[in-house]
Amino acid sequence: MKRRNFLKLSASACAALAALELGDRPVFKAAYAKARQAKTSLPGSLGAKETPSVCEMCFWRCPIVGKVKEGKLVKIEGNPKSPANGPRVCARGNSGVQLLYDPDRIKYPLKRTGARGEGKWARISWDEALDEVAHNLIKVKEKYGPHALAYFDHGASAEFMRDIFKTLGTENYTNEPAFYQCVGPAALAYLMTYGYITTGTRQYVDMKHAKAMLLIGTHIGENVHVSHVREFIEGLSNGAKLVVVDPRFSAAAAKADIYLPIRPGTDTALLLAWMNFIITEGLYDKDFVERNCSGFHELKKAVKDYTLNWAAPICDLPVTDMKRAILLLAKNSPNVSIHPGRHSTWYGRGDTSRHQALAILAALFGAVGVKGGLYFPTPVKKGHLSFGCAEEEPETPKKSLSEDYYPFASTFGSPTSKIIQATRTGKPYPVKLWGINGVNIIQTIPNPYQTMEAIKKLDFIFCEEILPTETAIWSDIVLPGATYLERYDTVYTYDLLTPYLTVRQPVVKPMFETKSSFWIARELAKRAGLKCFNYNNEVEFIEEELKGAGLTLKSLNEKGGIVTYKANPYRDPKKLKVATEEGKIMLSIEDFADEDLDPIPKFIPTPAPPKGYVRLVYGRSPVHTFTRTMNNKWLHNEAPENHLWLNDKVAKKAGIKDGEEVVLENQDGYRSWPIKVKVTPGIRPDTAFMPHGFGSRSKLLSKAYKQGASDQFMITEYEDDPFMGASSHRTNFIRIVKAGRVIDLPELCPPPKEIPRFSAKKTRTGGK
Amino acid sequence: MDRELSKIFALLARGFSYPEEDNSSDAFFGAVKEVAKALDIPCNSLSYTEPELREAYTLLFINEPRGRWAPPFSSVYLGGEGILMAKGQDEARNFYLEAGLEPAVSSEPEDFLPTELHFISKLIENDKEEILSRFLKEHLLKWFPRFYNRLKALEPHPYYLLLAEMTWKLLNMISQEVIDETT
Amino acid sequence: MSQLAMVIDLSRCVGCHACAIACRAEWSVPVPYQRNWVKRMGPEATPKGMSFTFYPGLCNHCDDPKCTTVCPVDPEERVFKSRDGRKKKMAVRATFKDPFTGAVLIDKERCIGCGNCVEACPYGARYLNEELDDPKADKCTFCVERLAHGLEPACVRTCISGARIFGDLSDKNSQVYKLVSTKGALRLTSKEVNIGPNVYYIGKEKDLYLLKKTYAPHERKWENVKAPVRRRILQAAIKKLVKAV
């Protein structure tokens, strides 16, 4: 280039360039590695360095190994030493590489520059971001009191920051959508019946050794938790019989020996009729019930009028099929898996009761603490951590969101719907700051329109995020969290049939300026003036936890990153003692009666669809986790959009063809984005189904935006479960709009007189 | 000549970096204007504020609603998968190692546009024409045009459009010099 | 002679798609191409009941791989070695069936990227990777590279419900042999297309019925690879030149 002066620079230009001081940090440094000249590496993922860690593509947290070649993560596999999954991970687990290297990731702290929801922002420094969050936490607390702070939390990344909110003294320091939007009602029902959370994060049901299984909803196979699916399939392969009750012919229903396409909202009627049947026919385990259960007489009396004949028109099921199913289960008891379910926020009123009925059924069969039945966790010992804060429960305010609306909410936190209501109305007290961590509130909580309205009223809103979701574009400050592949978290223990202890370890260094959740919480606490998180880094507290298990991080890694224990799941039925007050399994729950709630489940019908509409239900796609994975290229490729399942007879009458693109309109007049219809005999005529999580409204998610429709935006009407305040998600109805024309859907399964119609004018406990 | 050319690429590298004090100063804009003039590229008075540029930069090169941004990483354009740390990253890394260098910041992908432009600056400074020729032909010139087209289609902030235009022109000029001579 | 084979148990398969992604991750198969795929069928009524099932598919490493017959590259002598040290010399084109393992493989050095074999496969198991500067055909290799290191195929390794059974059909003690010979496993064949696929499916009758009905191929695609061989080679060469310029 010395050869020709192809660029004529004036004297002033040369001077300007010469005078320029271009930053003082070096861009390059001397390298010691050699360039890779030839293809010396082994094919595929062979020869990679393996680091044990824990997946967080969903919440099952399978032990994994990250395989790194030349500083790059090339593959994720299960930890071969894991007794729960071995070298296996599901589609999401396999796709973590795409999350790590997703160009759409939040990379630096961001500060909103436009309006909330507009999605305009500028990068700022960590100092600035943390200072602003801390400043607002203190300011809002001083101005309105501690309870004006609310924390929406989910998953591993949320754990540390929760302690900040708790220490600041707000009663709203947790409202995990995991409870209020998911497992809450079921968790409560089983806790009160059996004294432990038989279904929460984990489900302690021994399908592997079952002789028969009952699934109500619970679409195992489309919802994928690896070890749970494995045990389900092992059980079936060992000859277990399967009864599936579901308005949709799910992947699990496809494997069933008996499939009952029940009318949505009537499962409790079926369960009560079954209970009555096995009591009157003497098919229940008398010894077990006498020895281990309390409240049998009350139960017997309460269910005596629920016959199969009564249930048949309500459930829209033939008596013969209902009878066949219960006889099959009875024949194989006590080794029957009465699956406790998980996601239970279906209809609001009656959700907790439905799971209480399931819990009771298992007890009547004596299917508790025996092979194939519900079993008990095997606690895995580890050191107790004290972060130096959040030891005490905050003082409750005069009118408490957590205690004064739903009698059992405080077990789990503050009901989400109440926090939103308080934010919108200022009653019973103002909520003025939201911190969000690990949950996409817009696509998780019913009536997103209401949520967005509430956000507009806040003084301040911030989130810790990994991807630019709707939550991020509505936040004032976005803190870039490191993915699970880039950080440590606390020690994880698994207390099911194959107990183990493992720890999440970083497989690669955090990219850009993303930081681990612990670091973020610690820095934030410092600036908020809290003496919290008295460890310098994660390894310090991990070593403390491991010490309590007789391990160090080094010794754990020498064993392949995971240590297994012997399970103790079963109990001698003659010596069974459960952790309820009486020490017995409670078939009638007095604590419920004390709060004017049903101590024994009753059938409370959920209103039937208005004429012209069908009920909208949703479920999981096996390749996606909520809305989190919609932008993941590999997963998106497997399932880029969702389809609406519509009954073939209904479709034919309404003139809708398979694959046609339509718009949905719900009972409140809200419309969805276009979605293709899947015409199928595998769904009831009064129901339509769509996989959850699609139809992202965040245009930042370059692949996910507008792909399919969002079920969440159709859920504008919800009812709260009166026990703990969880919100219903399946109490909305849709009809079809095709080429601008509204199509009323024909009613092929009219509801019986026992089930009232949905009426828009009725006052409800939830929101609109 | 080489010294100035090297400095120009260092200038462009800073221009495509997040706006901070040193690359949002009057002196910096002054130098950019002079180079644009020398390249016969029309440019108005560059009187942007740091906040304005920070917003524009974030929305163009970091995260943007509607996915309407121009990711400044070669992997996004070269790998086919459109993710980070793919083929482009490997290529860039290999070139740096050949020249005995590696990026000082290890948390960013190495195929970040400013890093690659700064690399060119270094190669010119140290007279590594052969590596420069291959770096351009086999790597940067394969993805920069796609990045540039993507940026143009966004009707972006004029400052960044200007920098891109300047970069493109310069890359073409030096590639003609260097690639012709060494092939 | 060995014949590597796979049996996929649809009664175990839950349609989780882990296999398709593990393969993609292991072999860097760029979206939208696939070496391994999962298609979903139903719910649909069959004479044996309502079925909602899955078609995990991959190259079948057929007994009579028609794809290898349409490769235009001139045959060249190649020495094949078995695991136990036996040798065999054979003249093969750029794609061939390994005489010792029965795996159908592609020699990437000799492949000219003409796409004949991609068109010829009735299962659509091959693809032309046009992401590469020098496009090549690609497909499942039964992970022979991993087998050489004593590891199972990536899809088998990750299958969460143990629905994939892999092994050597010539080993009468192997699980694949037993499953194939006793359980009446289904091969995805039809009257028109019957080239001996070595991926078998077992499971409930209703699911096998739906699978066969929906995905057994009927088109003898290899017969439609009409473009004269000479023109294909020329086309491929020109494409290469254009890309280099």
Image (cartoon, coloured by chain):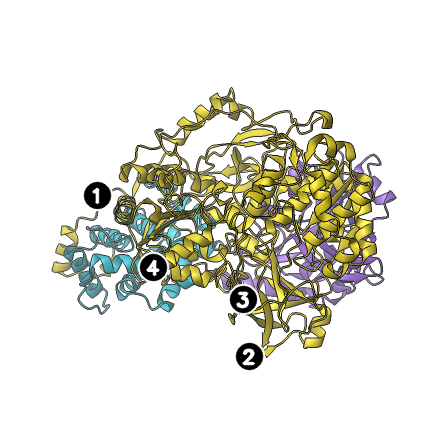
Chain colours: A yellow, B cyan, C purple
Mark 4 belongs to which amino acid? Answer: Lys
Between marks 2 and 4, how big is the CA–CA gap? Answer: 35 Å
In the structure shown, which secondary structural element does the residue marked by tag 4 occupy?
loop
Residue matched to label 3: A762
- Counting residues from the start of the chain, the first of labels 3 and 4 encountered is 4
Q: Amino acid at mark 1?
A: Asp
The amino acid on which the numbered mark 3 sits, given as a three-letter code, is Lys
**Callout 1 secondary element:** loop
- Looking at the rendered image, the disc whose residue lies closer to the viewer, 3 or 1, is 3
Labels 3 and 1 share a subunit: yes
Q: CA distance from mark 3 to mark 2?
A: 29 Å
Q: CA distance from mark 4 to mark 1?
A: 44 Å
What is the x, y in percent for residue C171? 82, 36
Q: The numbered mark 4 sits on a residue in which chain?
A: A
Residue density around tag 1, few if under 14, some if 14–19, many if 20 or more, within 10 Å: few
Mark nearer the N terminus (4 vs 1): 1
> Which residue position holds label 1?
A24
Q: Where does the N terminus of chain A fall, quadrant-wise? A: bottom left
Q: Chain of mark 1?
A: A
